């Protein structure tokens, strides 16, 4: 046995990860794919990688040094279970099976239980950065046992992206913690993408900028606090001209956004945990709305505002949109980190939020200069209850909020849909409110269902005899 690490599944992500591993000092990489042809072409195309090739899963196991460590890179779902089954048959106690796909964290919890019952380690590892990241350095979020991380950690560190001199990988927590955090990463990714898309829409349809001009604006923004991979690539998308028609490519791309599930999972999970991730939810819903052509066609002639709001000062508006984007982005991340904290509580994971922010600084899709500020916030205040209440972010939002309010108001009066901008502002105002109309909801619930309420000035649970003389009684049980 010569290989210290193996990769199963050699589609683009798997091949790129295997090549990344092979390019790092100290690694010898065994590769296995269900169909041999794919293994063959990888080896042919990349002789420099010196892979140890396996034609069968038995050969693959035999080529790995103990404890055997293998990363599965197949489509999440049944394919993953099938490969785990195969590997558990040829691996031995102490060996480590890593799932590097976008698995649902509850599947990972289930798989970890089943695999560890056989004495093997199972690690669900979120890997972000797309194809390019897999090849040159992704951000990696491994779960599983601390013991398995002793073997796996150095290998993952050898291939991860590096940010501020540190590899973008850390042991997130046990069993499904890594895939949970990757799921939230993707949820935040959805919100971030939607916010940038809304900014584009406002600049295009209110300020009248062309896609190429907006690309220039985004390139400019990318030199400041908004500097991020997503802003950078959006500028490139907007600058692209379609070869067939000569139009901006964005104008010939069908405006129906697809999704593969991680955003939906984030929202479903957050709903179960009772965490308002409204920015992420709006991003998921915005994709859903876009993908309803029949409804959109039927509604396309519905009246909009009689006099669309005009942008008086274009430069001032562009700056307002930039500030609104930054404030909304702070809210999206704040909500995402809340969801991680709630998940950790629910599933018994000891997740260090500051470390999560750190490993998202490089390699992943949401990498941004801004992650440094989040890292600082958790370093200064490890028990921070809400990111938006950290001094840096409080000040940032305070500085942007006039712009933010103007943009949301403008969008409403001009009929431009900005669900993520608007809901983020509503969340901010809800969170900071001294009194919420939740008191009215409690009154309503007590009225029709005797669901009881608590008082601000006394302990206990109360009910008003709404259909009687309307006196208040102390209730023993609340429903
Ligand atoms: C990443 C990406 C990656 C993938 C998403 C896209 O972190 O590298 O998030 O996981 O591109 O699955 O998700 P949708 O297809 O749902 O937009």
Image: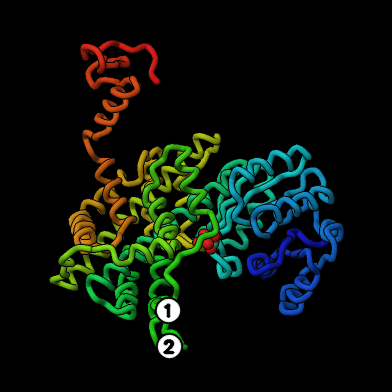
Going 46% across and 65% down the picture, which residue do you hit? 257
Quickly name the residue at label 1.
252
Quickly name the residue at label 2.
245
Going 32% across and 20% down the picture, which residue do you hit? 452
Q: Is residue 60 left or right of residue 359?
A: right
Count neighbours of disc 1 (C-alpha within 10 A) and say few if under 14, some if 14 to 19, many if 20 or more: few
Going 86% across and 61% down the picture, which residue do you hit? 59
Q: Position of residue 129 (x, y in %)?
A: 53, 64
Quarter assignment of residue 324: bottom left
Secondary structure category for the residue under label 1: helix
**From where the camera sits, is residue 65 visible?**
yes
Q: Which of the marked residues, 1 or 2, is nearer the chain's N terminus?
A: 2
Using the image, determine if residue 395 lies above or below residue 314.
above
Secondary structure category for the residue under label 2: loop
Residue extending furthest left?
312
Quarter in which the N terminus is drawn: bottom right
Q: Position of residue 19 (x, y in %)?
A: 67, 70
Going 77% across and 40% down the picture, which residue do you hit? 119
Q: Position of residue 97 (x, y in %)?
A: 72, 50
């Amino acid at each position: 046995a010569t290989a210290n690490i193996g990769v199963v599944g050699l589609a683009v992500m798997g091949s790129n990860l295997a090549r990344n591993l092979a390019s790092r000092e100290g690694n010898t990489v065994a590769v296995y794919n269900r169909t041999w042809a794919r293994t063959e072409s990888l080896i042919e195309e990349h002789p420099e990688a010196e892979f140890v090739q396996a034609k069968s899963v038995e050969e693959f196991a035999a080529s790995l040094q103990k404890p055997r460590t293998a990363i599965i890179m197949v489509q999440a779902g049944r394919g993953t279970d099938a490969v785990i089954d195969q590997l558990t048959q040829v691996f031995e106690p102490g060996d480590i099976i890593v799932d590097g796909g976008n698995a649902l964290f509850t599947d990972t919890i289930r798989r970890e239980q089943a695999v560890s019952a056989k004495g093997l380690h199972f690690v669900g590892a979120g890997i972000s950065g797309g194809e390019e990241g897999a090849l040159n350095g992704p951000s990696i979020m491994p779960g599983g046992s601390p013991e398995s991380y002793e073997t796996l950690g150095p290998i993952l560190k050898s291939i991860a992206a590096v940010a501020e001199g540190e590899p973008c990988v850390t042991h997130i927590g046990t069993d499904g913690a890594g895939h949970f955090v990757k799921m939230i990463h993707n949820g935040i990714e959805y919100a971030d993408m939607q916010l940038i898309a809304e900014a584009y829409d406002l600049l295009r349809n209110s300020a009248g900028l062309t896609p190429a001009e907006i690309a220039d604006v985004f390139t400019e923004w990318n030199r400041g606090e908004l500097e991020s991979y997503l802003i950078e690539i959006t500028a490139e998308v907007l600058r692209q001209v379609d070869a067939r028609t000569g139009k901006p490519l964005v104008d010939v791309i069908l405006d129906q956004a697809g999704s593969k599930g991680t955003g939906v999972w984030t929202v479903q999970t957050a709903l179960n945990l009772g965490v308002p991730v409204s920015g992420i939810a709006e991003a998921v819903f915005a994709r859903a709305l876009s993908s309803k052509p029949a409804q959109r066609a039927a509604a396309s002639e519905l009246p909009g505002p009689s006099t669309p709001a005009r942008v008086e000062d274009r430069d001032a508006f562009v700056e307002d949109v930039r500030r609104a984007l930054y404030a909304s982005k702070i809210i999206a991340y704040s909500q995402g980190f809340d969801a991680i904290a709630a998940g950790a509580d629910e599933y018994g994971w000891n997740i260090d939020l500051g470390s999560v922010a750190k490993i998202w600084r490089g390699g992943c899709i949401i990498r941004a200069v801004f992650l440094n500020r989040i890292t600082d916030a958790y370093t200064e205040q490890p028990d921070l209850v809400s990111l938006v209440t950290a001094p840096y972010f409080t000040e940032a939002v305070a500085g942007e909020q006039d712009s933010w309010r103007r943009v949301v108001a403008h969008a409403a009066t001009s009929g431009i849909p900005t669900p993520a901008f608007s809901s983020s502002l509503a969340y901010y105002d809800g969170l900071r409110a001294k009194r919420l109309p939740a008191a009215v909801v409690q009154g309503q619930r007590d009225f029709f269902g005797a669901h009881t309420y608590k008082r601000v000035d006394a302990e206990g649970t109360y009910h008003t005899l709404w259909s009687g003389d309307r006196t208040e009684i102390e209730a023993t049980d609340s429903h």
